[in-house]
Image (cartoon, rainbow, N blue to C red):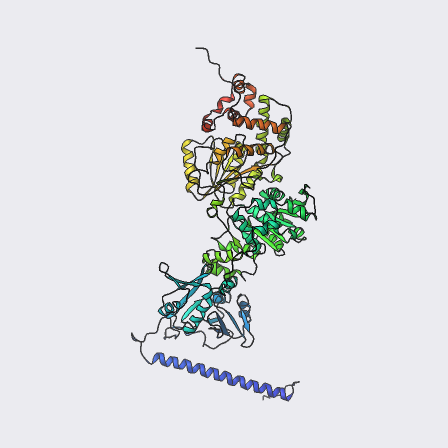
Amino acid sequence: MSFTVTSKPSTSLSEEQLKRMEENRKRALQLKQKSLSGNNLTNNSNITNNTSKPFSENNKPEPNSTNKIHTLNSSPPKSSGQISQNYGKCVYLESDPTSRFEILVGYNKDLIDLFKTISSRKYDPDTKRWNFALTNYDELLLKVKSKLNNSVKLEPLDRVASSKSTGAKFFLIERNRFEVQVEYNPELQDLFKTLNSKRYDPQTKRWSFDLKEHDELVKKIHDKFKRGEVNLVPLPKFVRDVFNDLLNGKNTPKIDPSIDFEHLKKNIDIAIAKSLMPFQIEGIEFAIQQNGRLLLADDMGLGKTIQALGIASYYKEEWPLFIIVPSSVKFMWKESAKRWLYDSLIKVCKLKNGDCVDEFIQVMESGRQLVYPKSKIIISSYDLLAKNVDEIAMYQYKMIIADECHLLKNNKAARTKAAFKLIQNSNRVVLLSGTPALSRPAELYSQIQAISPTLFSNFHDFGMRYCDGKESRFGMDYSGYSNMTELRLLLEEKILIRREKKDVIQELPSKMREMVILNPTLIELNTRALKQASNKMEENLKGMEKRGALLKYFQETSKVKAKAVCEYVNDLLESDKKFLVFAHHQNMLDELEAELQKNKYDYIRIDGSTSSENRQVYVQKFQNSEKCQCALLSITAANSGITLTQANLVVFAELFWNPGILVQAEDRVYRIGQKNSVMIQYLCAKGTSDDQMWPLVNEKLNVLSRAGLTRENLSEASTVNGPKNNAFKDLIDESSDTLDKKVEDKLKINPDKHKLKETSKEELQDICLLLDDDDENDDDLNTVDFSNFDRPPVKKPKQ
C-alpha cells in the first residue's frame, strides 16, 4: 500500500505577488508556444517548397543561397534557428546599417565577456543587445569560433544574394582625397559621377573624391541601395577624427602661420637659431604645432640632434629634460647639450653668462646612481633606465627625448616598459629614429602609443588595417603591411615628420663631418702602458725619440678605445644602413672583426694583406649584396683605388695625422655615383691622444676639404698648448709638407738594430708615412715589405 502526502509550501509572498507571478508564467508560456508554432510553420513551408518540385536546370538552388536544402544523406542543422544562449544572428543595426551591426542572442556570460574585448562594442539597454562596427565583424566571428570552440553559433550577416553584393572600401590616398576600391557596378558608377570632385584613374580603374564629400557619398550609397546590396567599408573613425577639418571642408594648414622663424628666434637658444637649415626650422615648427609630441624620423645626417635640442629649448620652462639614448652616444649628447643649450641652462639654472653648466647636466653611468636634485638635463641609456626606473621615476620629467626610438618596438621588453613609465607622465615627447619601420608597421605601434595614446584605441584595429592582419594556425598574424599610403598620411598629419636626403639635397653640403665622443666608461684610461706613453709625451723630447713616443701613445690609444668603438659600431648595425669603418692598428681591426663575427653580421675586410684580386671581389660584394652591411678597412691600405658608393656613412675608429690620407679615405664613398650627401664621423676618446690630435686634424681638414664641416660637430674646438699638443702639431704639419731631408737621411744612415726589432710593423709603417710627402701616390705604401725591418740591412760588397 502506498501513500501520497501533499503539503502546501510555506511562503512569505502575498497573494497579490503570487497572482502576478502566475500571470507572468502564463504569458511566458503563450509567447514560447507562439514562437515555436511560427518556427515550425516556417520550417514546414521550406520543406514543402523544396520537395514539391524536382531540381531542374532552372530551379537549382544558388550556391550562396541562404535557403538550405537537406537531403536524406546530409546532416540536419544543429539548431532549429531559434534564438538562444547558444544560437544567435548578426543583423545590420537599424539606426546605422552602413557602419554597424548587432547580435541577436540569448544571455551567455562567456559570449558577453568576449564582446567586451571588441573595441567598437556598444550596449543598448533598451533592446538589451550588443552592437559593433562593421570593421570588427570578421574579428568577432573569428573570436567566437576560436575562443568558444564552436559552442555558440552565430548566423552571419544577410548579404542579400551575396553573389550579387558589391564590395566598396574607402582608402586615403592624399591628405584631402580618398579612393574607392570597388567591383564593377553600373549603378555605383552612375552614382560616383554625381559628385563634384570625382576623378577616375584609367590605370588603376578606381574613383577618387575630395575628403569633404566622404559623408555625402556614404549617405548616397545608403539611400540608393538596399541593405546588403553594397558591402560598404568607409574610412575608419580614427582616420575621420584626424582629418575632421578637411571632412568638414576646412583646408587647415598643417602648421599654424604664427609659428614661424621669427617666433622661434625669440624662444630658442641663439646658437641653435643661427645654425638651423630651412628643413630643420620646419621640423621644429611642426613639433610646436603638435605640442611637442612627435616622431622625428629624418635620414641619418640631417641633424635630428640639433632639432630635438631646439624643441627642448623651446619648452625649457618645463625642464628637467630627460634624454634616453643608446649607451655608446651618452657623452656625445652631453657635449651637444653643453654646446646648443647653454643659454637655456643659464636661464633655467639662474646663472650668469660665462658660468660652467657641467654640474647641471648629469649622465647616468650605473644602475645604482641616483638623479641629483639640481640636475636639469639627465642623460641615460635604455638599459640603465630599465635597471633604475623606479628611482628615476620619482622625479617628474615633462620633457623627454628618446634617441634611436626603434629600440622601443617591442612593448614587452623591459626597456620599453621603463621608458613608458616616464613617458606616460610627460607633456612633451620627442622620439628620434633615422630608420622608422614603415615597412613593418606592427613595430611602429608602441612608438605611436608613446606619442599619441588615443590615436588608435587598440592594436587589433591598427593591425587589421595596416598590418594585413589575418588568422593563422597560431592565432592572428600581424607581420605584414597594407594601406601604407593611408598610414603615412595619417602619421604625417598627427605625429610624424620625415625627410630623406634626396628630399633636401639642395640644402645640404655634399660632405658633412662630425666628432663623436665615445662612452668613457668603456675606455681603459688606467692602463700602465697608456700612462707611461702619456707621461713620456710630457718630457722635452727631440727628433726620432719624440716621434717614437708619439707613435707609442697613438698605439696605446687604439688599445684602450677599442671596446667603446665596438659598442658604437654595434649600435650602427641595428640601423640596417651600409657604412665603412676605417682603422689603422691591427688590434682595432681584429677586435672589430671579432665583434662582427660574434653578432653574425655580413661584412668585408680590406687591409694590407688583402690581394688585388680579393679587393675587387670584396668591393663587388659590398656594392651588390644587401646583406653586407659593413666594410672594415685599413686607413693606409684602403684609402684609395676602391669605390664603395653604396654607403653614405664613413666612420673613423681612429684618427690619423696625415689629413690627406683621411680625405682620400673619405672619398671611397664621396665620388661619382654617390647620390646622397655623405656623413663622416670621427670617434674620439677623452683622456687619450685624441684630445691633442682632433683639434689639429680638424683644422687641417678644414683647409683640405672643399665641403666644409657640419654645424653639429666640434669644428671650433680650441687647441691646448703644451708639450703633447706641440709634438702632435709638429707631426701633423710635417705630414702635410715635405719633410726635412736630414730626418730622412738620419733614418737611412743610422739604423738602430735593437730598436728596429722591438718596433711593430705598424710603427714602421707610420715612420714611412712620415717620410712620404706625395698624397697622390699613397698606394705605393701598400707595397712596402715591412718584413725587411725585422733585421738590419745586409751590407753588400763594393762592386
User: Which is more toward the observer, 538 or 475?
Assistant: 538
Residue 112 seen by the camera: yes
Tally of numbered tags: 0
Q: Is residue 608 left or right of residue 10?
A: left
Q: Is residue 388 left or right of residue 120?
A: right
User: Which is more toward the observer, 707 or 263?
Assistant: 263
Which residue is most to the top? 799
Which residue is most to the front? 262
- Tell me the quarter of the image containing the N terminus: bottom right
> Could you say which quadrant of the image residue 228 lies in?
bottom left
Name the spot of residue 433 as percent of width and height, x first: 53, 49
User: Which is more toward the observer, 313 or 369?
Assistant: 313
Residue 5 seen by the camera: no
Q: Is residue 354 left or right of residue 224?
A: right
Name the spot of residue 134 as percent of width and height, x first: 47, 68
Name the spot of residue 493 as percent of width and height, x first: 51, 57
What residue sits 47% from the left and 45% below the top? 506
What residue sits 66% from the left and 46% below the top? 345
- Tell me the quarter of the image containing the C terminus: top left
User: Which is more toward the observer, 468 or 6?
Assistant: 468
407 shown above or below 221: above
Name the spot of residue 53 as percent of width and height, x first: 32, 79
